[in-house]
Every structure is written in structure tokens, then in C-alpha cells.
Image (cartoon, grey):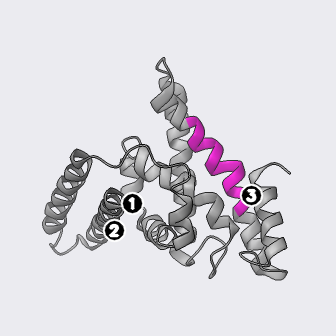
Amino acid sequence: MFESGAILTYQAEKTGRFLAPSGAARYASMEWLHWSIGGLGPMVGQLNFFSLRSPGKAPLATDRFTREADRLLGVMDRRLSDCSFLGGSNYSIADMAAYTWTFFVSTRLDHVLADCLASKPAIYRWLKVVGDRPAVRRGMLVPQLDEVPSLETIASLKQRIRVAEEELDALRAPGQEEFYMQACSTVEALELQLEERLRQAVT
């Protein structure tokens, strides 16, 4: 058997875990499983190549895949703002499929998608919940990660939080409520990102 979606579905049905046997919950998980396989993974993979690995610069391709990754992460964040997990209230194979790509975005492509990630606190909440699962923690060590976040990266993130908090203080005036709430979300997302980076550095 090949293809990750087919393998995940087979394993879920074989074990009776991480996929509802029938009904709306099953199809919600299947929708998001295929969304990840057909959208998130391929687009993030292309962005990784053109922004990090390509020997030549291709601004048009980099911009195209940055915009598409931003759009997909926006779809994901809106879903996770309404539900605990992609498939609904329970962890499922949809989360398994999306986690590694999203983790990669938050750790290796954050320099490309920093502004995008800062406005998506629901994704960081989900990354922490899924990443704290014991089986996920074990799985993320296969293969062993070749590096941990540098102290400079963590220091830079702390500086971004300080700047965002200063901007937040400046928006406490009457009539700035909408911008204040947006700034609160940015600070929250950055703090969750810092927490995740610090956790990676000690595990």
C-alpha cells in the first residue's frame, strides 16, 4: 500500500482509532485529511524548495507559493478557531497528516511566513496540543531532528514580542478597539510560538 492518506485510513479502520466509523464526524476528518494531502503538503513543499533549497532565485514562484501557503494556513486557522481539531472535537488522522507540515512551517519557514503566522493563534494552540501527545513526541524523533532552534532565533522572537507589546500599549486609546484586538491576537500568537520554540530547545 502507498500514499499517506490511504495508509492512514487503512490503519485507522484496522485499529478502530482516530477515525469515526460512520457519519458526519468521519467525513469531516476525511475532508481535512484530503485537504492536507492535496493542498497544504504540496504547497508547503514547493515553498520550501523555492525559498530554501533552490540554487537559483525565482521570485515569482516564491511569491506564488508564499501567498498560497498563507491562504491555506488562514483556512486552517479559521477551522481551528471553531474546533479543537481539524476533524472536529476529537484528534484524528486529519491532524496527523497536517501536523508535520504545519510544524515545519512554524520552525523552518517562519522567516518566510512570519507575518502570516503571527496572525494565526489558533494554529499555535493546536500545534501545542497535538505536539504534547506522547505518541507524537516519539514520532517526531524519527528521524532524529538534526538541529534545535538557535538562541538567536529565540532572542529574536522575544524582541518581536516586546515590539508587539509596545504597539499594543499605543492602541489603548478610545476608538482603537478593533486594532487593539488584532494586536492582542498577534502578541498571543508570538507568545505561543516562543513557547513552542523553547520546548523544542529542551527536548
Q: For the C terminus, give its image quadrant.
A: bottom left
Residue 100: within the magenta? no
Residue 1 drawn above or below residue 177: above
Q: Are marks 1 and 2 in contact (CB under 8 Å)?
A: yes
Q: Is residue 70 left or right of residue 119?
A: right
The percent position of residue 9, horizontal first and vertical second, equals 80, 65
Give residue 183's quadrant in the image. bottom left
Q: Is residue 115 left or right of residue 6?
A: left
Precedes in sequence: disc 1 or disc 2? 1
Disc 3 to disc 1, C-alpha distance = 25 Å
Mark found first going from the N terminus, 3 or 1: 3
Please, what is the three-letter code of the amino acid marked with disc 1?
Ser
Q: Secondary structure at mark 1?
A: loop
Amino acid on which disc 3 is placed: His
**Foreground: disc 2 or disc 3:** 3
Q: Which mark is residue 185?
A: 2
Residue behind mark 3: 34
Amino acid of disc 2:
Ser
Relative side of 85 to 104, left or right: right
Q: What whole-number distance in Å separates the C-alpha atoms at marks 2 and 3?
A: 29 Å
Q: Pointer 3: residues within 10 angstroms few (<14), some, or many (20+)?
A: some
Q: Which residues are magenta?
A: 33-46
**Residue shown at the point (62%, 76%) measured from the top left:** 91
Disc 1 versus disc 2: distance between alpha carbons?
6 Å
The residue wearing badge 1 is 119
Secondary structure category for the residue under label 2: helix
